[in-house]
Image (tube, rainbow, N blue to C red):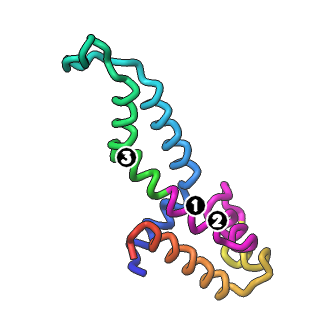
Amino acid sequence: MNREYRLYVEFELRRYEQTKANYESLKHDIIHESPVHDGQPKSPGGVSRPTERKALRLTSNVRLRQMEHTLKSIDTVLMSLPEDRYKMVQMRYWDRPRTLTDDGIALRLNIDKRTLYRWIDGLLQGIAKEMGLK
């Protein structure tokens, strides 16, 4: 895998929980925004269509769609991982502060360091493929 793609996928994996929170927050903001008169004529009878406007914003917001695509790509791969590989993801990418080195993670999982690196490569390649980077 291309080094830049690998770094990008690792970046997205590290901030997976933050992206999830940002996604939910942006979605909430769009759904619960107060109606603003935008100067456009209203539908017949003078009734605005806030629900349709919000649905359109939810589906057309580029940032929201990108976050959703990233989260779905990571979720798809994570859901297919065996328990020991999921633990590896937690220890290597999500534990803060990270207290274990790669050697420590391998030791904790009772695997060889080369096996750990194969697992990491497989994980990152799977996510990259789901994201359409590979």
To which residue does mark 1 refer? 75
User: Residue 1 falls in which quadrant of the image?
Assistant: bottom left
CA neighbours of label 1 inside 10 A, class few (<14), some (14 to 19), many (20+): some
Residue positioned most to the front: 44
Mark 1–mark 3 CB contact (< 8 Å): no
CA–CA distance in space, label 1 to label 3: 18 Å
Q: Provide the secondary structure element on which disc 1 rests.
A: helix
Mark 2–mark 3 CB contact (< 8 Å): no
Start-end of magenta stretch: 71-99
In magenta segment, residue 75: yes
Residue type at tag 3: Arg
Residue 44 at x, y percent in the picture: 24, 16
To which residue does mark 2 refer? 79
Residue 67 at x, y percent in the picture: 44, 51
Upstream in the sequence, badge 2 or badge 3? 3
Upstream in the sequence, badge 1 or badge 3? 3
